[in-house]
Amino acid sequence: MEVVVAKQQKAKKQINLFYCSECEELALKVAASSDAIQLQSINWRSFDDGFPNLFINNAHDIRGQHVAFLASFSSPSVIFEQISVIFALPKLFIASFTLVLPFFPTGSFERVEEEGDVATAFTLARILSMIPKSRGGPTSVVIYDIHALQERFYFGDDVLPCFETGIPLLLQRLRQLPDADNITIAFPDDGAWKRFHKLLLNFPMVVCAKVREGDKRIVRIKEGNPEGRHVVIVDDLVQSGGTLIECQKVLAVHGAAKVSAYVTHAVFPKQSYERFTHTNSAGPADQFAYFWITDSCPQTVKAICQQPPFEVLSLAGSIADALQI
């Protein structure tokens, strides 16, 4: 038995994990969750003209080894320097290369609704599809809760997209609640229901929808009953949060005992997270009991600093597991 266990431990890939500056805290957590991961570093510098002056440390020492890069494309201004490193690493005679991009930022711009629209989800997917092959073959690209699963077809054949989800982290947290047996899952629209309902089949469900009343679009309950329940709204991402707030209001009106929310990607541009903090709520009826997010958007996590009702569910353990695929 001990021999079998020893062989299983030896079978683990030893990963050299590089990371961008924004992801340092997450990278430290990933490394802490697995003894098979060793952190490596990059000198992120700039020339006087603003263009990147980059240096990959220990480039010779990682030859023949498995390498990963933890990225955060939080704004267009940081993408170029990271793409430069991502394109350089596979050429250092490494055994394999994995790109971990927890949040695919252009995922919600995947459709062309009228001639002239630019589907930037396709653009970014095509850029990543040009990552050079390592000695082990195509690059694996790990992404969490991409906005639409059909975006897998935007990637070319020279990369292997691996789509993971943060929902197991939510399920683990829900089991810890004192009212765990009184949870109902709500979806803000049909898109969220299609995206996540099969992962949450053990819970009663409520589906909301936006309907037009005159010049306004109003959130209504399409199906399900929230009365007396602790309702958890689930979606892949949040921007301004307007839809979540409208859902909370309609669920409360229909008798929900408490309303919480979970999103994998807390984008929150222009500090829009502030409208959810308890200090900025109009009253108890307008508050979220919990607002769970992951650390896929490091800048948001740093800004929120665990202000109620926010709780951060770290992807670190999941990323460590994904690097062993």
Image (cartoon, grey):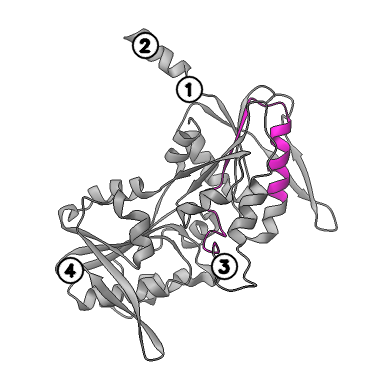
Amino acid type, label 4: Asn
As measured in the structure, the alpha-carbon distance from the residue carrying label 3 to the one carrying label 2 is: 53 Å
User: Which tag, 4 or 3, sits closer to the chain's start?
Assistant: 3
As rendered, which of 189 and 240 lies closer to the eye?
189
**Where is 4 relative to 254, above or below?**
above
Q: Is residue 60 above or below residue 73?
A: above
Q: CA distance from mark 1 to mark 2?
A: 13 Å
Residue 164: percent from left, percent from top:
44, 44
Label 4 secondary element: loop
On the image, numbered disc 4 is attached to which residue? 225
Q: Neighbour class for label 3 at 10 Å: few (<14), some, many (≥20)?
A: few
Residue at the image point whose x is 22% and y is 69% from the top: 223
- Residue 25 location, x and y as percent? 53, 46
Mark 2 is on which residue type?
A: Val
The residue beneath circle 1 is 12
Mark 1 is surrounded, within 10 Å at the Cα level, by few (under 14), some (14 to 19) or many (20 or more) other residues, namely some
Which residue position is annotated with label 2? 4
Q: Would you say the residues marked 3 and 2 are in contact, meaning their CB atoms lie under 8 Å apart?
A: no
* Badge 2 density bin: few <14, some 14–19, many ≥20, Cα 10 Å: few
Hey, what amino acid is under mark 1? Lys
Q: CA distance from mark 3 to mark 1?
A: 43 Å
Q: From mark 4 to mark 2, how far is it between C-alphas?
A: 51 Å
The percent coordinates of residue 64 (x first, y second) are 66, 21
- Nearest to viewer (mark 4 / mark 3): 3
Residue 88 forms part of the magenta stretch: yes
Q: Are marks 3 and 1 in contact (CB under 8 Å)?
A: no
Secondary structure at badge 1 equals loop
Q: Which residue is mark 3?
A: 112
| Residue 141 position within the rendered picture, expressed as x and y whole percent measured from the top left | 56, 42
First along the sequence among labels 3 and 1? 1
Residue closest to the eye, 89 or 275 = 89
What span is in magenta? Answer: 81-110
